[in-house]
Structures are given as structure tokens and as C-alpha cells.
Amino acid sequence: MNLQFANRVAVVTGGGHGLGRTYARELASRGAIVVINDIGCAPDGLSTAESVAGEIASSGGTATAHLGSIADPTVARTLIEETVDRFGRIDILVNNAGFTTMTDFTSHALADLDDLLDVHLRGPFAATQEAFRHMERNGYGRIVFTSSSAGVFGRVGGGGYSIAKTALLGLMNIVSLEGMKSGILANVILPSGKTNIEVRGGARVPSNDRLRETFGLMDSFLAPEFVTPLLVYLCSEQCDVSHRIYSVIGGRYARVFVGVTEGWMAEGTTPPSVEEIAGHLSTIDAMDAWTLPLSAEDELTEVAERRRIFPPRGHSPESRGGPC
Ligand SMILES: NC(=O)c1ccc[n+]([C@@H]2O[C@H](COP(=O)([O-])OP(=O)(O)OC[C@H]3O[C@@H](n4cnc5c(N)ncnc54)[C@H](O)[C@@H]3O)[C@@H](O)[C@H]2O)c1
């Protein structure tokens, strides 16, 4: 399989540095026209949207820089509009821009939550909504959202960053379900890379010696380039998955999913007592069998089938499993 992107137009937000820079370069090296958005100079001053566009141009690729904060929804929408005005279409949107924080929950200012939601949720919402309209008309689109294991699994001190990153799963759910009929695929990645990402509120240091040692030993596997191949696959025409979450860390590529245990079916038609819930908690919790609902409606239908309200539909092997 040789994945090429000739005539495909891609937007990478926060593409001036770190992970986004590697995405932009790899997409361009495979023929995509890449629009690189960034606020300007990354905190360490190493590279910018313009310098990445320059690197791509000097290797024979096509790229253009767009300067502006994705945290401003007007800028986010304009980024997409200008891309379509200039190149006639948008095929790929990589929502990547962001910064992180280290703040204890009790000292977290509400205003800081707004800043995090602006860059990680509202910006991607606005850019994606604008891109979705164009992609829908073309019957084709690939959208990737950048969440974080600090969001999906949590991180002490993750604060609003973790919260905003988890909210992206909700955005991806809606975009993937509503995009399916128009050839728009949307997925989430949880990347991990040594990038000097801006950390506001405190340093992101390993919380104990073992973790510090682990980071040191894993160093060579934490290059941003380890994340790039999965991201680029999710942006490709050959990609045939949507509504999924993938984790990349230390050269390990894995699917992350939200499943439902088989649970306990209350007998009869009246609600169970609190004591019955307490008595069945181990069955409710048991992870030896689970399903993976494809939507909220799917979960309801599944339970209706178990109640024999509907005949069973027959499930794809991937929507059921266990033990996990
Ligand atoms: N590096 C990791 O281990 C890691 C882990 C989980 C998630 N992530 C996520 O991956 C994404 C990329 O992070 P990175 O590690 O490459 O960081 P990075 O700092 O190297 O790159 C992020 C880029 O986004 C830009 N940016 C920040 N705010 C912006 C805004 N409002 N508008 C436009 N551009 C903006 C920065 O200038 C920077 O160039 C982020 O969303 C981050 O939260 C990274």
C-alpha cells in the first residue's frame, strides 16, 4: 500500500512546531497541499508556521502559513474559508494546536478553564464545523482531533487541560456519526511525544523517581515522528475507520474504547431497590463481557434486545468482547 495525497488539501493547526510540524511535513512529502496554522512563534522559539512552510517548499512540496489563534472561533472559521478560497477545497483537517497546564484542582482558576476550552474545544469546534460543510458538499473528508491520555485516563494536575481534551471525544462522536453518510471520517488520537509543549501554571515533571527513570529510558521512543504515521494514515483515502480513538505512546499503537459491561438486568417491571444495586455491584462492574455501542441509540437497542422487546440483530465481532 502506497499512501499518496496528490490534490488533497490539508489544514494542520498548530503546525509550526512539535507534532504538528511532523504531520505537515509528512503529508506534504506525500503530495498534499498543506496549510499550516499557528499563533506565531512556539514558546521555545524554534520553529514557526512560516519556517515549516519554507522547509516543505525547499523539499519540493506545497505549503502555506496561516498566522492566527485557533482559540478565536472567527479565526478558526476564516482559516478554513481562506483555504477553500485559495485551493478550492479542504479534504483533511488536523486539529492539533494547543498548550497544556499543571494546576491542582483546588487552585484552578475558572478563567484558566476558559482559555483551555477555547484552544482545545471551541477552536476545533468552529474549524471543524466550517470544514464539515465543505467536505459534505464534496462527499469526502478526513478529520482528526488531538485528545490526550491526560484527558481520557486523567492526570494529577491535569485540570482544565484534561477536561477540555476529554470534551473532544464528544465532538468526535458527533462529527463521525453525522459525517458517515457524506464520506467524512473523524477519529481521535492520544499522542505522546517529546516536544517542549508550552506548560502553563507549573512544570510538567515526573511525579516520582521510577517515572523519571522510565521517561529517560523511553526517550528515543518518544520522538514526535512515532506519532506521525498513525496520524497520516487516519488522514488518507485508504483509511476506512471512523469514530475511533487511538493511543500512541513509546512506539505502541493501540485502540482505546469506551465499552459497557454486560451488567445486571433488573428483574420484573418495577425499579430495583438501592439494596439490590448494592448486592449486584460486582455483576454490574464485571468486565468479563462487554459491548461497544456505536451510538446512544445503539446502546438502547441492545438492552431492548436483551429484554426480548426486539429480536437480536446479530453483532459484528468488534462490538462485543471480553475479558478485558
Ligand atoms: N506532546 C505530547 O506528549 C502530547 C500528549 C498529549 C496530547 N498532546 C497534544 O498534541 C498537540 C500538539 O502538541 P505538541 O506536543 O506538538 O506541542 P507543541 O507546543 O510542540 O506544538 C503545539 C503548537 O500549537 C501552537 N498553538 C498553541 N496555541 C495555539 C493557538 N491558539 N492557535 C494556533 N496555534 C497554537 C503552538 O504555537 C505550537 O506550535 C496539542 O494539542 C497537545 O495538547 C501532546
Image (cartoon, rainbow, N blue to C red):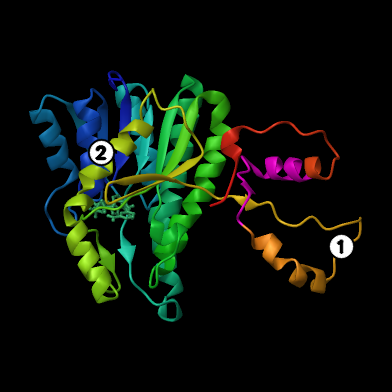
Write down the region rendered in magenta.
287-303
Residue at label 2? 23
x and y percentages locating residue 94 in the rendered image = 35, 39
| Residue at x-position 45% and y-position 81% | 106
Amino acid found under the numbered disc labelled 1: Pro
Q: Is residue 99 left or right of residue 225?
A: right
Task: Say whether disc 2 or disc 1 marks the residue closer to the N-terminus.
Answer: 2
Task: Tell me what residue is drawn at x 29 percent, y 68 percent.
Answer: 200
| Of marks 2 and 1, the one in the foreground | 1
Q: Position of residue 75 (x, y in %)?
A: 36, 45
Percent position of residue 99, x then y: 30, 59
Q: Is residue 205 magenta?
A: no
Residue 61, visible in the rendered structure = yes
Q: Nearer the viewer, residue 198 or 30?
A: 30
Front residue of this view, candidates 230 and 9: 230
Residue 202, image quadrant? bottom left
User: Mark 1: few, some, or many residues within 10 Å (few <14, many ≥20)?
Assistant: few
Question: How many numbered badges does the structure rendering display?
Answer: 2
- In this picture, residue 114 sits left or right of residue 253: right
Q: Nearer the viewer, residue 145 or 53?
A: 145
Asked if the beta carbon under badge 1 is closer than 8 A to the nearest atom of ligand 1, the reply is: no
Identify the residue at horizontal 86%, vertical 40% (top origin). Answer: 309
Residue at label 1? 271
Task: Tell which of 8 and 218 is nearer to you.
Answer: 218
Residue 290, magenta (yes or no): yes
Spatial CA span between label 2 and label 1? 52 Å
Rendered-image quadrant of the N terminus: top left
Q: Is 216 placed left or right of 233 in the picture? A: left
Q: Amino acid at mark 2?
A: Tyr
With 84 as the anchor, is 21 left or right in this view? left
**Residue 187: which numbered mark, if any?**
none
Work out which residue is located at the far right of the displayed protein and give it.
269
